[in-house]
Image (cartoon, helix red, strand yellow):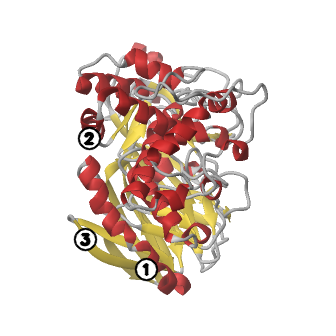
């Protein structure tokens, strides 16, 4: 993301319009003068310009149109964002890296706007008072998808042979639509997608209605549970929806390319038994529905987009003893990472460590662990990860403080996956399986629909366990050296080498190469 330091210069003149409140009531000049621009980022250590300061989004109403049956075409749309000012705002930003913007309105009045890198800088006609709600509408924005799998990192808005999808984690949802693109600012969504007749549009959440007019079909979906922009899924193209019988009241729907549906339907059905398995482990499923979206592409990863996990056909071609634990990993994310989102991206281990924990537990419970990993059992897996602990920390940084760099894969690295799961194993060893299971359930219950931090996890674990776990978990999550493993005094850590090893040199088991070739999300 391009910095905008020194680009947004000059103080805003206080005009007569700036002295009028949203409802048209005159306000003191001193109040208007106190209004300041919102920050151009939330100051995330790993993504400083991601998200924007000064306001909190409550809802998105996103409208998109695909003019023709062409996956590579430019799409157009508009978005109305409802938000609350958390400071008096003279100006604020949205994240947007699409092609263009037509017009911007704030509270129904024309607003000035400018593009600066991946920032859309908006100056309303009147300042926005602290604590008051406001609406911003961006009309006529355009975006063009990139071909899936052609880049070295997730592209956000991607095209496949059959249509387009979103793969926005961690910082590319705004390649498609203007947003406050940081998981700290979750919101509800209504998404209406218009496509030519014969195509299908599906989005995160529940289907609300479908209308037809002039050779086009508009499908509207509502995600009423808070969702981070990076987890939004919007798929449009020659796809079909396969509905399955609800599991515990949770409807299951899958989305496949029409021409591949018959081959993929059977492989996806395991999600039903996995839903039953995981709800018994951690409690009620947190969203309206669930399912799998499969595309013909070479993404190199699977991704837990909310209510509709994304896979490519390469992943779905893997044998069941590999594919099924991956699917359990993505399902676990609906609780860990989606319902409870990270407060900052350094907290990504809370997503990936937990999803890896349940991935491995699923392989064990379904008696496929040895085939999946080449290791005898979970304890052998954790011992192998433990031996690599110092090498992981030297190469990638501590579990809860990954090294920042230009590459997304230095954030989504093996130490937040396997190392994060190892930290959870150490916690279980420290307090016992029953208290650990209670922490897991309490975590997803207390922070359901919210964004939460590592510090909050440590505090909750301490409260539930009845122990002060802060020193213990701080060493495991932030230490440069791997602590001793409770209950395994004979486990030894391999010596860290001076030069950082490549990912392929630090894989715990061979099949992980197939999952981490692009670093499975």
Asked if residue 36 shows in the view, the reply is no
Structural crowding at the residue carrying mark 3, measured as other residues with C-alpha within 10 Å and reported as few (<14), some (14–19) or many (≥20)? few
Label 2: state its secondary structure. helix
Label 1: state its secondary structure. helix
Label 3 or label 1, whichever lies nearer to me, is 1
Q: Quadrant of residue 406?
A: top right
In percent of width and height, residue 98 lies at: 64, 53
Q: Nearer the viewer, residue 247 or 92?
A: 247
Label 2 or label 3, whichever lies nearer to me, is 2
- Residue 266's tag is 1
Say left or right for 369 vs 251.
Answer: right
Who's the residue at 71% across and 23% down the image? 6
Q: Nearer the viewer, residue 213 or 198?
A: 198
In percent of width and height, residue 206 lies at: 31, 65
- Residue 246's tag is 3
Residue hosting label 2: 441
Who's the residue at 42% across and 19% down the image? 472
Is the residue under label 1 in contact with that under label 3 (CB below 8 Å)?
no
Say left or right for 494 vs 138.
Answer: right
Structural crowding at the residue carrying mark 1, measured as other residues with C-alpha within 10 Å and reported as few (<14), some (14–19) or many (≥20)? few
């Amino acid at each position: 993301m391009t910095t905008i330091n020194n680009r947004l210069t000059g103080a805003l003149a206080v005009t007569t319009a700036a002295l009028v409140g949203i409802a048209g009531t005159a306000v003191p000049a001193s109040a208007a003068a106190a209004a300041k621009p919102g920050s151009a980022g939330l100051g995330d250590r790993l993504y400083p310009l991601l998200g924007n300061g000064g306001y909190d989004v409550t809802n998105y109403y996103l409208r998109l149109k695909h003019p023709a049956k062409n996956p590579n075409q430019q799409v157009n749309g508009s978005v109305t964002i409802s938000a609350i000012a958390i400071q008096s705002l003279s100006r604020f930003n949205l994240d947007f890296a699409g092609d263009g913007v037509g017009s911007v309105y704030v509270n129904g009045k024309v607003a000035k706007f400018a593009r600066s890198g991946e920032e859309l800088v908006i100056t309303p006609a009147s300042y926005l008072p602290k604590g008051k709600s406001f609406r911003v509408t961006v009309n006529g924005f355009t975006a063009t998808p990139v071909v899936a799998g052609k880049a070295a990192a997730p592209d956000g808005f991607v095209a496949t042979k059959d249509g387009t999808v979103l793969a926005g984690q961690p910082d590319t949802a705004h390649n498609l639509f203007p947003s406050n693109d940081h998981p700290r600012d979750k919101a509800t969504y209504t998404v209406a997608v218009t496509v030519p007749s014969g195509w299908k549009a599906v989005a995160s959440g529940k289907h609300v209605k479908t209308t037809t007019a002039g050779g086009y079909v508009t499908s509207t979906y509502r995600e009423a549970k808070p969702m981070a922009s990076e987890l939004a899924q919007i798929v449009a193209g020659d796809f079909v929806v396969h509905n399955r019988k609800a599991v515990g009241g949770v409807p299951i729907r899958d989305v496949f390319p029409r021409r591949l549906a018959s081959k993929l339907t059977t492989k996806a059905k395991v999600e039903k038994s996995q839903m039953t398995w995981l709800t018994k482990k951690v409690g009620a499923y947190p969203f309206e529905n669930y399912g799998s979206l499969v595309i013909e592409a070479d993404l190199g990863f699977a991704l837990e987009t909310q209510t509709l996990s994304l896979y490519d056909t390469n992943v779905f071609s893997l044998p069941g003893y590999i594919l099924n634990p991956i699917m359990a990993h993505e399902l676990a994310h609906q609780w860990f990472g989606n319902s409870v989102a990270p407060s900052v991206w350094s907290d990504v281990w809370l997503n990936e460590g937990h999803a890896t924990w349940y991935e491995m537990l699923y392989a064990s419970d379904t008696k496929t662990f040895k085939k999946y990993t080449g290791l005898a059992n979970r304890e052998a897996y954790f011992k192998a990860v433990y031996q690599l602990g110092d090498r992981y920390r030297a190469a990638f940084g501590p579990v809860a403080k990954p090294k920042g760099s230009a590459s997304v894969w230095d954030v989504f690295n093996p130490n937040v996956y396997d190392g994060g799961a190892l930290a959870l194993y150490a916690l279980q060893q420290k307090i016992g399986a029953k208290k650990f299971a209670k922490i897991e359930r309490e975590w997803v219950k207390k922070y359901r629909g919210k964004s939460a931090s590592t510090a909050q996890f440590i505090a909750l674990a301490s409260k539930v366990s009845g122990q002060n776990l802060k020193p213990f978990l701080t060493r495991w999550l932030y230490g440069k050296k791997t602590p001793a493993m409770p209950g395994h005094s004979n486990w030894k850590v391999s010596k860290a080498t001076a030069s950082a090893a490549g990912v392929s040199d630090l894989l715990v088991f061979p099949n992980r190469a197939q999952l981490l070739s692009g670093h499975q999300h």
